[in-house]
Amino acid sequence: MPGTSVRTDESQQIAEYWNDIAHDFDAIYTGDKNPIARSLDRWLRRDIYQRFEWVMREAGPPDLRGMKICDIGCGSGRFVASLAKRGAEVTGVDFAPEMLKLGAQLCEKESVADRCKFVLSDVLDWKTDEQFDLVIAIGFWDYVADPLPRLQVIRKLTKTTFLSAWPRAATLRASIRKVRLKAEGCPVYFFTLPQVEDYLQRAGFSVERREILGQLHCVRSRSV
Ligand SMILES: C[S@@+](CC[C@H](N)C(=O)[O-])C[C@H]1O[C@@H](n2cnc3c(N)ncnc32)[C@H](O)[C@@H]1O
């Protein structure tokens, strides 16, 4: 795994937070927890499953052979493995090594490891000339104080389409989450739709479609 170090104290703090809770996070997908916690996930974290389905729909036809996809902040590789199972070549980028370990194990288990690559890096530090037909960044912007520099890097990676999910500002759940994550040592950020659209446009994307799913703005945009 080509790797670079994380950039700022805050990045370091966020990477450590996700590294420590990698297995607990992945259990939201596997349901490997007690029945009460599982029910709470289905209720309070419904948009985690909804954003997954949204990406699977928006990615294109069932057969993605010939497509190159990049997943920014890929976490435990759930999107990477599912898109690779449809035939795409997928690269996942994340700065939490434990997350990438889970992602690599999942891709082995699903027999798609030959089409998947994982890169240990903050996207800001990732040096590559590669370009991708589709780039996704889901559950990622929550942990980015200043989205523009990273969006500009993502724009260079994106040949055509960029799918992103942004935590909505000014909801009751946003305030509760901010307090909870701060207590757990992880900063979290929220965005209004005009802010999201402005960032995307300034980075060189044009917004094609947007929808609200639970606490999220899900936005499909295109390189211009
Ligand atoms: C909530 S998890 C989402 C994982 C995956 N996208 C999903 O939805 O299942 C957020 C992930 O983003 C990663 N992440 C956050 N900021 C990052 C950054 N600046 N560069 C690389 N990875 C980052 C974290 O390490 C973590 O694995």
Image (tube, rainbow, N blue to C red):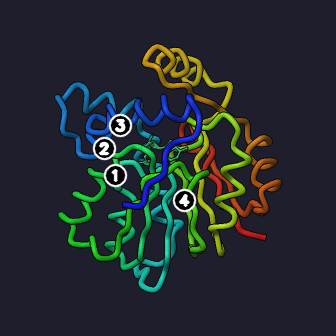
Which residue: 56% across, 64% down? 135
Q: Note whether 146 is above or below 173 in the view shown.
A: below
CB atoms of marks 2 and 3 within 8 Å: yes
Question: Alpha carbon of mark 2 to alpha carbon of mark 4: how far?
Answer: 20 Å
Which mark sits nearer the N-terminus, 4 or 3? 3
Question: Alpha carbon of mark 4 to alpha carbon of mark 3: how far?
Answer: 21 Å
Disc marking residue 200: none
**Classed neighbour count for the residue bearing mark 4: other residues with Cα under 10 Å, few (<14), some (14–19), many (≥20):** many
Disc marking residue 19: 3
User: Which residue in the protein does label 1 denote?
Assistant: 100
User: Which residue in the protein does label 4 denote?
Assistant: 136
Which mark sits nearer the N-terminus, 1 or 4? 1
Which mark sits nearer the N-terminus, 1 or 3? 3
Residue 198 in percent (x, y) is at 81, 48
Q: Does ligand 1 reach within 8 Å of label 1's beta carbon?
A: no
**Classed neighbour count for the residue bearing mark 3: other residues with Cα under 10 Å, few (<14), some (14–19), many (≥20):** some
**Mark whose residue sits in front, 4 or 3:** 3
Question: Alpha carbon of mark 2 to alpha carbon of mark 1: how far?
Answer: 5 Å
Which residue: 39% across, 43% down? 96
Q: Quadrant of the N terminus?
A: bottom left
CB atoms of marks 1 and 4 within 8 Å: no
Q: Note whether 201 is above or below 156 in the view shown.
A: above
* 117 or 182: nearer the viewer: 117
Disc marking residue 98: 2
Mark 4: which amino acid?
Ile
